[in-house]
Image (cartoon, grey):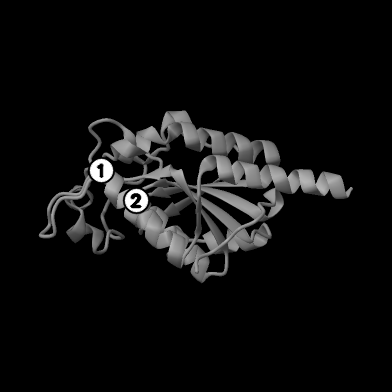
Amino acid sequence: MGMTIDKIQANRTALIVVDMQNDFLLPGAALETPMGRDIYPSVKRLLAHARHSGMKVIYTVHAHRADGSDRGMFAEVWPPIATGACLVDGRPGVDIVADLKPEEDETIVKKHRYSAFFGTDLDMILRAANIDTVAITGVTTENCCHATARDAMFNGYRVAFISDATGTFDYPDAGFGALAATEVHRVTLGILAVSTAHVMSTSEFIELGDASRNGRRSAA
């Protein structure tokens, strides 16, 4: 039960950094996700590893048109999106946080829903690069990261879901009791580990990549 990844080949793997944007991560932001700031060190380690090893790096940005024409049901589910208080294309809130800025040649995929595959060209980008494995990082664990991981698996990719490089926020009581971010995160990881992905830490992911490179050198 569950997915097992026993090697990470840099030239067949993409690191996907999901929605690490000002509107989610700056203190006081409309959709503030404090746990997202806690994962900066892990995401930085993964970015350094990916760039050093030649792994493809892809950022996603959640953004909506200023006229609201692509908000869909988000306008009902999330009031700050409905009012245009956040995630408006062209405004500073949709920018990647300064600590994690993409390099000039790295891909940015603009999306309008939780999943980075829904209504985007992400699948085409991955297939053109001969990618068969994706590593999911960013926010939020149970929404955009979870949806992207699920769609990656549905599209035939192996999925490494990085446990200490994903994060979420506290949920208010909507009739089932309030939920702490740590509990939402833990439960989501447990579900994904059984149904969708190989859930692993940053260190485990890097070690799998290092082992694959060392194995190729030994074979040579």
In screen coordinates, is 159 left or right of 8? Answer: left
Percent across and percent down for residue 69 are 28, 60
Mark 1 packing: few (<14 Cα in 10 Å), some, or many (20+)? some
Q: Circle 2 is placed at which residue position? A: 186
Mark 2 packing: few (<14 Cα in 10 Å), some, or many (20+)? some
Percent across and percent down for residue 92 are 35, 35
What residue do we see at 67% from left, 54% from top?
Answer: 7
Rendering quarter of residue 177: bottom left
Residue 117 visible in this rendered orientation of the protein: no
Front residue of 100/68: it is 100
Give the CA separation, mark 2 to mark 1: 21 Å
What residue do we see at 63% from left, 61% from top?
Answer: 132
Residue that sits furthest to the front in the current view: 1
In screen coordinates, is 2 left or right of 33? Answer: right
| Number of marks | 2
Percent across and percent down for residue 173 are 12, 53
Quick check: 112 above or below 202? below
Residues marked 2 and 1 touching at CB (< 8 Å): no
The label shown at residue 31 is 1
Disc 1 residue type? Answer: Leu
In screen coordinates, is 144 left or right of 219? Answer: left
Disc 2 residue type? Answer: Arg
Residue that sits furthest to the right in the current view: 220
* Of callouts 2 and 1, the N-terminal one: 1
Percent across and percent down for residue 33 are 29, 40
